[in-house]
Amino acid sequence: MSEKSLKFPKNFLWGCATASYQIEGAWNNDGKGESIWDRFSHTPGKILNNDTGDIACDHYHRFKEDIAIMAKLGLKAYRFSISWPRIIPSGKGKVNKKGLAFYDRLVDELLKNNIIPFITLYHWDLPQVLEDKGGWRVKDTSYAFNDYAKEVVNCLSDRVRDWMTFNEMPCSVVFGYKDGLHAPGLKEKPEVIRQVIHNMLLAHGLGVQTIRSNAKKQPEIGIAHNPAVKIPKTTSPEDLSAAKLAFLDLNDKESGNAWWFDPLSKAKYPEKNTGISEITDEEMKIISTPIDFMGLNIYSGSMIESDNTCGSNGFRIVPYPENHPKTTMDWYINPDCIYYGLKLIHEMYGISKFYITENGCCFNDIISKDGYVHDNNRIDYLNTHITSAYRAISEGINLAGYFLWSFMDNFEWSHGYSKRFGIVYSDYKSQKRILKDSAVWYKNVIEQNGVD
């Protein structure tokens, strides 16, 4: 590393992340039940090219090969999710021992290779049986999640310390229950959407309590959340204040930050008239059960400037220039999203420990004539965003680790296999894995514990 290199804290965790439905395949093997994503992807017209996760990256059968690649890259940690219907096919009740055994083997293989497992209990693949009974629209699902969490913790917590209850609840709510773009593909009324929010938050709180009371080794518990990041246009105090006002904007009733951070941190919703039926003080207490860290999934952010004109609420969203660089997901590239995502949440909610649980980019990667994937655009993206994370650390924010999304190309939800986020290239026909240039670059970052 050069003299100008940015050296991260000694015990900083460098990792990668994946999700069960996106990589595992084996959708109906060894007693696994149907998930809402199985049903959704099997419905013609829901997924681009009618792709499904039936096989995906076949990680269920190839996990040892994949973990060997992780070890080759020097990963310190690996964040993965558990498939609820693989554990309890009917959503609640009888446990599928073969499903648990898969994750048992996975954890052992990770530890054998000195990779710390970070488990996410829910990354969107709800058992279809529960959806048929109301899904996240009913509180019974919150308590079913609690029972499922207990089974997983009882099996794996003798070796696993680090847990996340949910991944990106706002996406589950907006894309799954409001816009119909993700499973279960519904377009519900606002009052139903609010109930879904509450029931997911309740499940989170129940899960935190269950992990803490049943874990066999002292747990570290958090959540992987995708905040709507606001970036001040300039470093002026006026624009920073405007960004904080925009962060708490209550006009966004479903994915607005206050609708998630207020109940999690303050045991209350930002408005009294929530439209949610049967909220009790006990439920709010459960929802706000203290966690040990906040995981943030951050890819981009909106630019904000101060605006004191009549009716402005004190801020204005500044459009990006027409030629501003974007990924092939049409997400604007602005590395400051990492720094300000951490800074604003730390200052506004007093959260003391963070992980970046997802950050990465999608580009049209191809295998070159030499047999390699030369993704310099991804290297540039990762380098600038990791540098942004260092900026937060240098100002005293406790960022304990960074999980790159994603370890390998996989099923990208409604986009099917048309989008590639991985640092490992997946050939879906042959299931061959090819290290992209970004994987070699990331290996060096991990070895040097920093970036140039």
Image: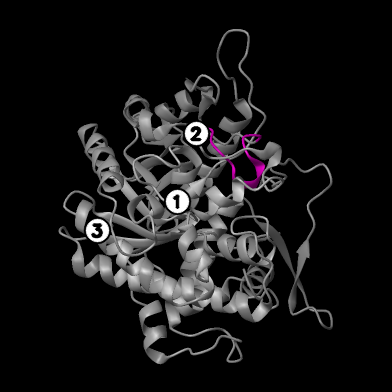
| Residue 357: assigned label | 1
Of pointers 2 and 3, the one earlier in the residue sequence: 2
Query: Which mark sits nearer the N-terminus, 1 or 3?
Result: 3
Q: How many marks?
A: 3
Q: Is residue 260 above or below residue 49?
A: below
Q: Residue tagged by mark 3?
A: 153
Bin the neighbour count of mark 2 within 10 Å (Cα to Cα): few under 14, some 14-19, many 20 and up.
some
Whether residues under marks 1 and 3 lie with C-beta atoms below 8 angstroms apart, the answer is no
x, y percentage for residue 89? 38, 55
Tell me which amino acid carries mark 1.
Thr
Q: Nearer the viewer, residue 373 or 248?
A: 373
Residue for badge 2: 55
Highlighted magenta segment, given as a residue range: 409-418
- At mark 1, the secondary structure is strand
Q: Earlier in the sequence, mark 2 or mark 1?
A: 2
Quadrant where the N terminus is found in the figure: top left
Residue 380: assigned label: none
Q: CA distance from mark 2 to mark 3?
A: 27 Å
- Cα–Cα gap, marks 1 and 3: 20 Å
